[in-house]
Image (cartoon, helix red, strand yellow):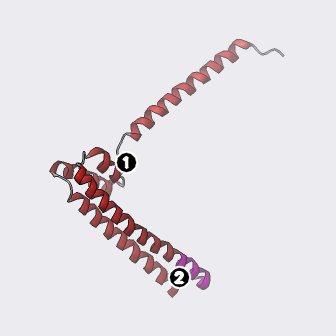
Amino acid sequence: MKIPLRPVIVLLLLTLFAGAVGGALGVAYGNRVSHTPTNLDTLIHHELDLTAAQNDRIEALEAHYAEQRKVFQTEMQAANHDLAAALDNEHAYGPQAQAAIDRFHHAEEALQVATIKHVLAMRSVLNQEQSEKFDRAIHQALTAGRM
């Protein structure tokens, strides 16, 4: 049985064209999304036009906060290990599980407080115009789930 060559070539060309259009649209979308500030760090370091002094101060604040965050995250991981051990030992929601959950929540709360203090410390470094943009980003992050 002989397959007609013309319909196969047309189908192949249409497939290539559709793939090229899809790829171009994907690249265009990706470029648009990648230029949208996606987090507070991007906003601060690329959108607020910080002075050298502001940048130095914010970098110091960020380094301090990174240390704090690591401590709290390590504590939360340890609490999760405690919870796993409690569930292995008790096979129920018992006192060991409750203690592990309390430990986790304490570390989580401490991290949230440290984060808010860090955000406010960074804000204190900004001028009025920068603060307004920063405030909008913080509000959006807290109400819409993204920065």
Q: Residue at the location (47% across, 30% down)?
A: 25
Give the labeled residue for mark 2.
Answer: 93
Left/right placement of residue 37 relative to residue 92 reads: left
In front of the other: label 2 or label 1?
1
Residue 115 forms part of the magenta stretch: no
Whether residue 94 appears in this view of the structure is no
Residue 11: x and y in percent read 65, 20
Residue 7 is drawn in which quadrant? top right
The magenta region covers 81-91
Whether residue 5 appears in this view of the structure is yes
Q: Residue at the location (44% across, 69% down)?
A: 73
Q: Which residue type does callout 1 highlight?
A: Thr
Nearest the eye: 59 or 33 = 59
Residue 88 is drawn in which quadrant? bottom right
- Cα gap from disc 2 to disc 1, whole angstroms: 39 Å
Q: Residue at the location (45% across, 75% down)?
A: 75
Residue 65: x and y in percent read 34, 65
**Looking at the picture, does residue 35 appear above or below residue 75?**
above
Residue 69: x and y in percent read 39, 67
Circle 2 — which element?
loop
Q: Residue at the location (40% across, 75% down)?
A: 107
Give the labeled residue for mark 1.
Answer: 38
Q: Quadrant of the N terminus?
A: top right
Q: Which residue type does callout 2 highlight?
A: Tyr
Circle 1 — which element?
loop
**Is most of the magenta stretch helix, strand or loop?**
helix
